[in-house]
Amino acid sequence: MAGEDTSLSGLAGRYALALLELADDKNELDTVAGDLRGLKQILVESEDLRRLVDSPLYSREQQSKAISAILKKASVNELTRRFVLVVTENRRLFVLSDMIDVYLAELSRRRGEVTAKVTSAQDLSDTQQQALTEALKKSMGSKVQVDVTVDPSLIGGMIVKVGSRMIDSSLRSKLQRLQLAMKGVG
């Protein structure tokens, strides 16, 4: 299912658009967006959860029980909880990550924001995140929504993606470039 369509016309897009409309009707766009960012981070960090979400071997009931427990622990709002449970009931959990991406991208688009995907080696403090947001806003000339994920394998630094542009200042990449340069010397 890796090639799933994430445009608004695809499966993920239809679900995300439905959630966006419901959240807009209830004036909970930002609350739902925050919940979805949290769920996305949990998906990134938990291999067991990814296995549960991606595997067709788990029954609907098993997935539902596990997802309900995660949603309760994450303290998501009622609309987000009901949405994820409907996705689970419809056996569409394997597309949840794409649904989250489409929801957040469409929300940003409607607000005239540019989304910057930032992967850092460790959690950014509020001050660091604010400074990064301001620097990106100045560079891009428009409102910037920063989507931060943590990947300890970067060792240090960060990777920033805005549209088709990418800036990789991670220590891992610098070490890889150095390793390649050293191989060329001998």
Image (spheres, helix red, strand yellow):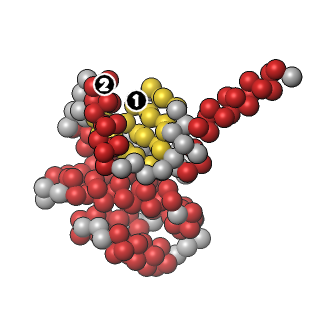
Looking at this view, is 130 or 103 the one in front?
130
Q: Tell me the residue that label 1 is attached to.
A: 163
Mark found first going from the N terminus, 2 or 1: 2
Looking at this view, is 161 or 63 the one in front?
161
Residue 178 in sight from this viewpoint = yes
- Looking at the image, residue 23 lies above or below residue 72: above
**Depth-wise, is mark 2 or mark 1 nearer the camera?**
2
Callout 2 amino acid: Met
SS type, badge 1: loop
Q: Residue at x 29, y 41 (%)?
A: 130
Q: Is residue 152 left or right of residue 40?
A: right
Q: Position of residue 89 (x, y in %)?
A: 39, 70
- Looking at the image, residue 182 lies above or below residue 127: above
SS type, badge 2: helix
Q: Position of residue 120 (x, y in %)?
A: 48, 44
Q: Is residue 152 left or right of residue 35?
A: right
Residue most extreme to the top? 185
**Whole-number angstrom distance, CA of label 2 to CA of label 1:** 11 Å
Q: Is residue 154 left or right of residue 68?
A: right
Looking at this view, is 118 or 89 the one in front?
118
Residue 86 in sight from this viewpoint = no
Callout 1 amino acid: Gly
Residue most extreme to the right? 186
In which image quadrant can residue 56 be found? bottom right
In which image quadrant can residue 41 be found? bottom left
Q: Tell me the residue that label 2 is attached to.
A: 140
Q: Residue at x 51, y 39 (%)?
A: 157
User: Is the residue marked by circle 1 packed among few (<14), some (14-19), or many (20+) residues within 10 Å?
Assistant: few
Q: Tell me the quadrant of the picture where the C terminus can be found.
A: top right
